[in-house]
Structure formats: structure tokens, C-alpha cells
Image (spheres, coloured by chain):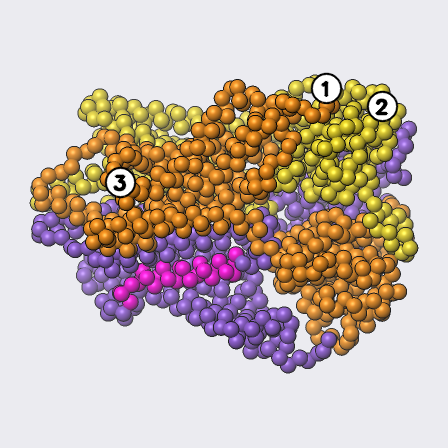
Chain colours: A orange, B purple, C yellow
């Protein structure tokens, strides 16, 4: 590759110009894809295989040898086979001594085995240095070069130097290694590709639960009640009218639930007079999924916005308008313009638009690439100040929407208030408590506690 | 800089506290910008130039010497000049021996020369170690510090150590080096900054073709036909009505074309009974630009949504409504409310909103920073499960939009069906075939094939 | 951890399998959070503290010793305390000699002290090697593991090797180190977390100023004028009608201001005949905040779009429509359809939609993760070509909106033209000048100048 390098005055002692040979055990899908990629990156590749015949599928430029021969040619051996076949390595132990074995395997289920595959491999051939890597990348992604999803490769291992060697290979194929520590992290790394949005589970179930509740609530109030009492068939409300009641209600409640744990945490800190005792577990978990709660709330708000904007296009609405106008025309009288209604209608819409705008802004700043470019003060400013402003605007939007209908008994059907009234409970509580917390006295207390002051210090420094 | 370091007990053998001098040949735009940036990062800089007079433009703190003198002062020499002037380096070969030459040049056209500039440089002064780097960064970006576009610097070279030295410099000026392998990669790296959305070309041409076809199709049906037969001038339909027919049609077809190659690939795999034979080239290419196809479909869907939402604001629509209402009022009769139309209108709008919502969600997850934060299982869940759901919703949206007009002969003009009927062909085929493929028998077959099973195995392992 | 490593044939001379002990001075919030994280990453941790009693809060697995004892155990000492307490280090100087001290402190105000905390620390114990790091990360973020905001850790220091050691630690805890050069950069790094959107200040103030101006302008024309002359109370226009006049006007002006500095720069370069003299300072600063200006313009455009789309839902608009229709019905006459109005209304809406669409596209490409994936040519294509197209579309949208009302005297109230007329001034100037600049003669001149040609060269090379 670079034969001139011998007669140059090297700038550093060891001029390692050639990439070291890498051995891959297993000529399956993943092994071949990785081999192909490594050859492209300039690594000499040798495959170790039971049969050395399968040349047509093997990437060009790679050798295929028996396991023992292949292992002798390289310092790094990538074990691209399934855990069940690992035991063939035991007789090779003498050859593998001191080599770096890279475990790339995945399981089919989370925590399928008591110990991680990498740990099992390390126990099987204890004289080797096992590194876990590459399990988060799929063969197809490597092969096609379209690494649309994550380029991150989690690497762990007990031997720093072995890990470093593997991380160099990861970098060479255009991926980003992330050191996850010692081999005991392998269990978590092996579970990672099997996860399906673990942080989203609770928020999604919560929002589905709220949606179901309000769906039946609205079904009773808006479809069954008029059917029973007025014998009117409003079943087509199921398509837009009912969803457009559920979405804003769930969005507002979820948004309030984003800010409720912060308020609870402040109360707990004030009550305990210290920030050094742990929060209850449920509060910790709740705080960790606030971002997800907020994004789901944004999704509901998005749907609410578009459900609302199509209102004038709906056949039912157009028919009702026409009917109203024709009735007025035939009766030869017009409704006078009400300034109050003008104000209420316009300000409720304006508050909604501003709230949605800030909500979208919050959503954009929670994109990883945006939040990576702000410092903590800016992040907190956006997520806390702008977040509360969004909550205030959306709550006001709902309050003004209610307008002077709030206590009118005609809006109660079977003693059930309108759904939007229920949605106001949590946000109003959050806003009132927050308002109390930022009163000068409590705010000063809280700031001191958060800076480390303790009311009843148990330890001194 | 750090004079105390001599009398400290160093933790590692070589305490290299000072950055090494870097030499830049050429005092042009790029050379000066890079020099300036390097000085800021603490590198001593020496310029090599034919004339050593041009001090006013040279960044402060840099020396300007003759080429030979400058080269002697540094181990790394950045050649910031154009390829045509490289031959002045030949007489300097003795001085340059063993040094690292960094080729930062770009060409004006893709594949302008038979060999890459870096290769040419390496041939000209073979005793040096040539590294290609920095060509993707513009002088202006370096100078202004606003690296809004990519911070990635592709680096390639045959000498690992030389490459490492250059990558350190890249990191020092706040950019991200990406090792692209040996010097033969230089051709591709030199072509990179000349590219203009190569992956987008086919999808864009395809969508432009579809747009043009449906434009003329709708022009004939919706403007020329009524002009010929009813002598009505609907030319103003060109602004909104026609685009709002084209956009949804093109969006739906493009979305179906995102999922068609996957279905074709499954059929090919089932037919061949193996996943190890390569797909035809056109299918491979098609699969690689699915993301782009999907994003263009999203753009058309976005336009469709806003074209639809402004409907009630349009003068023509308002006039038509007024006219209809006044006619009814004058004739003293009102159209009765049709529950069927209520259902059709509301559910077609609801399906459209939900489809658009999922489509936007797909778009957001295809943002690099978002897809970097999900694992492959999650990525596939979103792009495949949610993607098919989007396709189903959008197809249903179009079907319900057709409603009971589908086979009514009045909607045929010159034997041409409505454009939306044409748009349903591809999505319906994709959905039907997919439905067949997920039938238990075929699904089991396909899963086995994708796990590596072969119907007629040619090789054994 | 890896007891087998002693009897393996190591591949490289030093097989450093164990992470080195890290010492943390100070058991406050940040010290403990960092210690906890480091233990998770496999570092042995020893805390140096005045009192060695506070074991309950100290992360499990860490030792707590006196400052002197703790310092002796580690090569790296993280000083997790406030600047005011640094002087206790002076008596420890002998023990600290040669060690790496990591300054993680922040101040409460920008430039609170004449020298940076890190510099002060280096002066206090000159025989140590001080590295600034970790100050951009909050204790809470480390503790909770939800590093939602930036993962970037700015590192600076005079000793390269010490810096490298600290950067390894940064990487080990899952953060991204960014080498910012010598210790003199510490001042800037300490100011960074105190900043609140510094690049956004000018654009935000400018847009607030414009908003305030046009608010009062529209207040006078649209509310006070009809109140004075027609005694009509249009105060409810404050909620939607007035904002929907302000938003498009401010958006268009801000968008034009994004492209004005580029046009000015071209004029200056043409006039001076060189690109090598610096632009005036205000122009440089203006050019650096174009992205922010554009994004704020997009925010106003977003609001304008939604304010416009709710028009048909507004009570006032519905009432006015009903009133108009009923009046027509009662008078038994209908307004004839005007083809011109049909064209004007539809094309102004279509231009607006297309302009907004391109504007959103520009916004998306300015997301860091998107712009990182395009090369400079593509970035410039999008930001310049598509940007000007957006400006042209939005200006045309406003011009067609004006339609034939432009010079009608009835639209002047108190000699004040409609706000949209004012908004057209800047964009029209920009577009006309740009049009002149791309005339063949000037374009050729400018291209030559930008490639480095000078009309009156002062220096020769």
C-alpha cells in the first residue's frame, strides 16, 4: 500500500501504515455484510468457516479458511454466528489465546439467557478478550449503505485496549462507537435492539386511556343523549366532531401532566427542606418521560388544529349554515351582530393559535439536533418559561371557549358537564400551585434548597 | 505556553504540550482562511509563497517564507492551490521527502481529470505522504465561523499516521473528520462537493413527470372540456383547483411507490427461494431512494392540505355558496340533510387528517437526528408499520372521497375518468399484494428466507 | 475486572485494562453527580472533602478521604467547588504538583471576574496542569441521565496531554468533548452557559420593534379611524384581524432583510473591485444573524397562515357573510361572478401557499441535522436559489393581494396607506437590485472578484 514509508523519516516511532487483518467467523448474512464493508475500508479480511467452498457469496478480496487457520491470521476475530453455536470455539482456545473476540450477536427476546451472550463467550474461552459491538447494526443496513437509522455502535468490554481496537474498526466503517464500559454492560446492549420505544410506553398507554375515557364520555353526551331524547341520529359525529372534542381535551391534560411532576417535586423539596433525599420512584419515572408526554400532547394538538380547520368544509356544517341563513331570509329577519361574541370567538381562536405556535416551537426545540445546539440555560428557558406560557395560553383558550356557557344548566346532559370542563381541572391546579410557588417567599426558599441549603442538615461540610 | 511542564512528573512519557507548526503553500483565499483558523486553535503557521510581501492579508501571527524555507519548518504542508500549479513542487521533492502533504483542492466538474488531484499530487512527489482533506469546507465558512452546513471533513490517504495527524488538525478547528480509507477514495471525495442532491434526482424527475401528466390530464377534463361543451371559462382553476387535484394524486402515487419495491423484493425472494441472490439493479436503486420518494410525497401532501384548507376563503367558492343559498331562499325550499353525505364528507376528511398526521410523523422520524436516536427495530416499526398505515389511510381517504360517484357515467368526460381514480391503481395493487404476502403461509416462508433459509441451497454451512 | 489479562499475549506493549482513579474535590451536588456517573463508567473514584463523614449521599463505591490523601491517589483531580473556596488548594501545592486539575466551575454573571476561574486556578497552583471542562453540563442532567440538551463538553487547557486525559473521561461518561484550544478560551467557555440566545437578540428586538410599529399603525387605521369617522367599535379586531395584518407584513420585511446584506455585500465588492477588504462591522454581524432573521420570519409566516385559515370559523366573518347573503336574498338580486376576482383571489392564495411551502422547506434545511447532511453546493442552492424563490413568491403574493386596490384613494385613511404597501418596499428593492446584479455584465464582474480577481491589485502573487 505504501512502500515508500520505509525510507522516509517517520515523524512518530511506529508508522503503522497497513490496516491489520480482521478475521470473521461465520459466513452468514451479517458476517458477509460486515466483511464487505471492512474490505471497502481497507482491511484485509479472512473468513473462518466450516466449509471453505462458498466463494460466490463471499465479498471479493476476502479469503475463506478453516476456523483455526483464519484465527491465526488476525488479532481481532468477529464472531458472526448465533450463541447456540459458540461451543465450537472451545477446542480452538489455544489458537484464540489473547485475541480480541468481537461478539455481535443478538437474542430474540429481552433477557433470553441468564447472562449476556458476550459474557457467555468470555466464560467459554476465558483466555480471550471479549468485546461486545455491532449488534445494533443490521446486515441490511451495512450492505445497502443506507444507514438511515442510528449510526451509533455501542461497544463494551473489560479490556481497554481491545475495546480501542474495535472502536477503530467501527469508525473505519463510518459508524460512531460509543463506549459503554465494562462487559457487564453487554446485557443492556443486547437488549437495546429489541426494545420498542421503552420511554414511550407509559405516555402512550396513558393517552390511550384518556382517549378511551373521553370517547365514551362524548359518545354518551353527544350521540346517545340526543338519540334518546330528541331521536336524532348524530352517528356521523364519530368521524370528526367527537375526535375534535377528544383531541384538545387529551392534549391539554397531557400538557398539564408534563408540568405537574415539577410542581410536585418543588412541594416535596419545600416540605422536606432539602434536595438531597430521593424523590419517590413514580415521580422520578414520571419526570423522565415528560418529553414524551409533551410530544404526544403536541400530536393531539396537531390533530385538533386540523380537525378544527376543516370545519367549514364539512357537509354538515355547510348544510347547517345554509339552513340557518335560508330560515332567516324566509323569516325576513337577521340576527344582530354581538360585539361580545365577536370578542369571545376571535380571542379564543387567537389564544389557540398562539398556544399551538408555542407548542410547535417546544416540539422543534426537543429535536435532538436542536437541543444539542443550545446550552442548559437556553434549554431551560425554552422548556420551562415557554412551556408554562404554552400551558397558560392553552388553558385560557379552553376557558374562553367555554365563555359564558360554563354554568348554564343547558350544557349539562345527564348531569355530565361538557368534556372541556373536565379537561380544565389538572391545568388549573398546576397553574394555581405554580403561581403560589413563585410567590417571593416560597421562591426564595426553593432557590436556596436547590442551591444545596438544608433546613435540617444532617451532615456538615 | 506551559513552561512549568518541564519540572513536573509527567504522567505519560511524551508530554507534547505545543502544537506542531503547520505550513500552508499558497496565500489564496482558502489558504488564508485556514491559516487564520489554525492560528486561533493554537497552531504556529508558516505560509510558503512565491512572493513574501503580501503581509496585509496574511492572518496576524503567521510567517511568510519562500516555499522551500516554509516546508522545512513543518511536518505537515497544506497545498492550498489549484492542481494546475502543482508542478512547482517537483523541484522541492528533496525537502518534502517524508512530509505530509494535504491536498485540499477541488475541481470545477465531476471527474474532470482521469485521476484525482490527490493521486496526481502523490505521483508528482512520490516520497511524500499525501492526505486528502478539507475540500468540502469553503473558505467563506472557515472565515466567517458560521459553519451552518456540514462540519464533516472527509479525510483519506494511504498512510495511517499521516491521516491521523491531519484528522487532529481537523478536530482542532472544530470540524469532524471522517476517515474514508485509502487515497483511492479521493476521487469520490473530490466529486462530493460538486454533487447536487444525487439521491434526489430520480424522485424529483419522477414527480415532475407525474405532475406534468396529471396537469395536462386535468387541464383537458376540467378546463378545456367545459370550455368546449358548456362555453364556460374556468381558466382560474389553474391557480388552485387544478393543483389541488394534482397534489393529492401525485402524493398518493409516490407514497405507493415507496412501498412497491419492498413488495417486489418479497415476491422475488419468494420466487427464488433465497435471499442471497442480488436484486436487479433497478430495484436496488429504487430501494435506496425510497426515503426521498416519501419526502417528496409528503411535500405534495402538505400542499394538498393547504390548498384544501383555503377552499372556504376562495372568492369562487364563496360566490358559489352564496349563489346556491340565494337560489334556495328565492325558490323557498331547502335541501334536506342527508345522513349519508354527512358520513361520507366527515369520514373522508377524518381519514385525510389522520393520514396526513401519520405522514408528518414519518417525515419527522426520517430527520437524521431523530432516526439516530432510535434503534433498528423502532425505525422499522415506524417506517414499515406506520408507513403502511399511512398508505391505507390515504388510499381510504381517496376511496371515500370518490364515494358513490365512482361508476357514475357523468364523471367521465371524453371517456377520461377523474384523476383520483387513476391515482388509486398503484396503491391498491401494493395493498392487495401486501395483504396476500402477510397471509400466514407466505409470511412464514418469507420469514424463513429472510433468516437465511434457502429452498435450493447451493452451498452448505 | 479482567484477571485473565496477565497471562495473555498482549498485542501492544501496555495493556492498560483498568481505568485510572479519578479524584473529586468537593462533595456538593455536581461532584457527587459526576462521581456517580464516573463509577458507572468504571472509574475508581475518591472524594476529597473536609469532612469524611457524609457517606449517605456519596455514590456507592466511592471513597471519601481528606483532600491531601485523596489527591495522592489520582492523577486527575476534579475541583467541584466554587471559585471562592479555591485558596484552600495553595497549601496542597506540593501534593498537586504535575497533576491535572479540572476546573468545572461556573460564575453567576458574564465576565464576573477579570480572569477566568480556570486561569485563576492555574495561577493559584502553577505547578499543576489545569483543564477547563464539564461546566456546560448540569448536575441534574448528569444525575438523571436525561441529557436532553447538549451533550457537548467544551474542553480547553494549555497542556495537550492533560486535555486528552480529560477528554477521555468526557467520552467515557457518554458526552462529546470539543477541544477549544488553550486555557485562554476558558473565559468564553465559562460565559457560554450564562448566555441566552446571543445570536437571536438583534433579530428578536428588530422583529419586536417592527411588530410594535405596525401594531400602532394598524390600530390607528383599522380601529381608531372607523371609531372616529363611522363610530363603529371594531376593538375585537385586536384578537385576529390586526395580528393577521402585522404577521405577514413583518414576515415579508424580515425575509427581505435576510437577503439585503448579501446584495449590499455584492455592491460593496463591485465598488471596491476586490473581495479582500473587510466588510463594515454592522454588515458582518448582519450576515451572521441571517439564519435567525429567517427563522423568525418563518414564525410570523406560520402565525399568518393559521390566522388566515381560521377566518371562515370566526363569528364576525360568518355573521358578515350571512348578513350579505340575506340582504341579497331579500333584495332579490345576486352579485354576478367576476372572472377577474376569481383569478386574483385564487392566485394570491396559491402564491401564498407555495411561498409558505418553500419557507417551511428552508426552515427544515436549517435544522442542524439536515444541514449537516448536505454539502456546501447543496446548502447554497437551497438557501440562495430557493430562498430567492421564496422571497419572489411572497412578494408576488402581497402584490396580487393588493390587486387593483393599490392606488384606489379609498384605501388611504388619514393619508396612511395599507400596511401591506409599506411591507413591499424592502422586498421590492432587494429583488430589483438582485435582478440588476445578475445581469450578465455585473454577474461576470462579481464572479471574477469572488474568485480572487482584484481591479487594483496591491500585491502580486
Q: Is residue B400 magenta?
A: yes
Q: Chain of mark 2?
A: C
Density class for disc 1 (Cα within 10 Å; few <14, some 14-19, many ≥20) is: few
Q: Secondary structure at mark 2?
A: helix
- Same chain assignment for discs 3 and 1: no
Residue topped by disc 1 = C84
Region in magenta: B382-406
- Cβ–Cβ under 8 Å for marks 3 and 1: no
Q: Chain of mark 3?
A: A
| Location of residue A328 by image quarter | top left
Q: Secondary structure at mark 3?
A: helix
- Using the image, determine if residue B99 lies above or below residue B244: above
Density class for disc 3 (Cα within 10 Å; few <14, some 14-19, many ≥20) is: some
Q: Is residue A282 magenta?
A: no
> Viewer-proximal residue, B342 or C408?
B342
Please name the residue shown 31% across and 43% down the image: A416
| Location of residue C451 by image quarter | top right
Instruction: Answer with mark 2 or mark 1, whichever residue precedes in sequence.
Output: 1
Please name the residue shown 78% across and 36% down the image: C62
Residue topped by disc 2 = C92
Residue topped by disc 3 = A411
Amino acid at each position: 500500500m505504501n512502500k515508500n514509508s520505509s525510507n522516509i523519516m517517520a515523524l512518530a516511532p511506529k508508522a503503522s501504515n497497513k490496516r491489520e487483518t480482521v478475521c470473521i467467523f461465520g459466513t452468514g448474512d451479517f458476517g458477509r455484510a460486515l466483511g464487505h464493508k471492512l474490505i471497502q475500508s481497507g482491511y484485509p479480511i479472512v473468513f473462518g468457516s466450516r466449509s471453505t467452498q462458498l466463494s460466490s457469496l463471499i465479498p471479493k478480496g476476502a479469503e475463506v479458511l478453516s476456523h483455526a487457520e483464519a484465527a491465526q491470521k488476525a488479532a481481532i476475530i468477529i464472531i458472526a454466528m448465533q450463541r447456540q453455536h459458540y461451543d465450537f470455539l472451545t477446542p480452538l482456545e489455544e489458537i484464540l489465546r489473547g485475541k480480541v473476540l468481537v461478539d455481535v450477536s443478538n437474542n430474540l427476546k429481552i433477557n433470553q439467557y441468564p447472562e449476556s451472550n458476550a459474557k457467555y463467550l468470555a466464560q467459554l474461552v476465558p483466555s480471550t478478550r471479549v468485546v461486545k459491538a455491532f449488534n445494533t447494526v443490521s446486515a441490511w443496513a451495512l450492505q445497502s449503505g443506507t444507514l438511515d437509522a442510528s449510526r451509533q455502535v455501542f461497544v463494551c468490554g473489560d479490556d481497554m485496549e481491545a475495546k480501542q481496537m474495535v472502536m477503530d474498526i467501527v469508525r473505519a466503517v463510518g459508524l460512531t462507537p460509543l463506549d459503554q464500559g465494562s462487559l457487564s454492560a453487554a446485557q443492556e446492549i443486547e437488549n437495546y435492539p429489541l426494545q420498542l420505544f421503552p420511554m414511550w410506553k407509559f405516555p402512550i398507554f396513558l393517552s390511550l386511556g384518556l382517549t378511551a375515557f373521553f370517547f365514551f364520555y362524548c359518545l354518551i353526551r353527544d350521540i346517545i343523549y340526543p338519540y334518546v331524547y330528541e331521536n336524532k341520529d348524530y352517528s356521523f359525529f364519530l368521524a370528526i366532531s367527537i375526535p375534535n372534542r377528544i383531541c384538545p381535551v387529551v392534549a391539554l391534560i397531557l400538557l398539564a401532566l408534563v408540568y405537574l411532576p415539577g410542581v410536585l417535586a418543588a412541594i416535596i423539596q419545600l416540605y422536606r427542606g432539602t434536595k438531597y433525599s430521593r424523590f419517590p420512584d413514580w415521580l422520578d419515572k414520571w419526570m423522565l418521560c415528560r418529553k414524551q408526554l409533551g410530544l404526544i400532547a403536541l400530536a393531539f394538538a396537531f390533530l385538533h388544529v386540523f380537525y378544527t380547520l376543516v370545519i367549514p368544509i364539512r357537509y354538515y356544517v355547510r348544510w347547517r349554515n345554509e339552513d340557518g341563513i335560508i330560515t332567516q331570509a324566509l323569516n325576513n329577519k337577521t340576527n344582530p351582530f354581538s360585539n361580545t361574541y365577536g370578542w369571545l370567538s376571535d380571542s379564543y381562536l387567537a389564544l389557540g393559535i398562539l398556544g399551538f405556535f408555542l407548542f410547535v416551537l417546544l416540539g422543534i426545540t426537543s429535536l435532538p439536533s436542536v437541543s444539542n445546539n443550545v446550552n442548559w440555560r437556553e434549554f431551560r428557558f425554552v422548556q420551562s418559561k415557554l412551556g408554562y406560557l404554552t400551558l397558560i395560553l392553552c388553558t385560557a383558550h379552553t376557558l374562553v371557549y367555554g365563555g359564558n356557557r360554563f354554568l348554564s344548566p343547558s350544557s349539562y346532559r345527564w348531569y355530565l358537564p361538557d368534556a372541556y370542563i373536565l379537561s380544565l381541572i389538572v391545568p388549573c391546579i398546576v397553574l394555581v400551585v405554580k403561581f403560589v410557588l413563585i410567590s417571593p417567599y416560597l421562591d426564595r426558599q426553593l432557590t436556596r434548597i436547590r442551591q444545596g441549603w438544608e433546613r435540617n442538615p444532617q451532615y456538615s461540610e
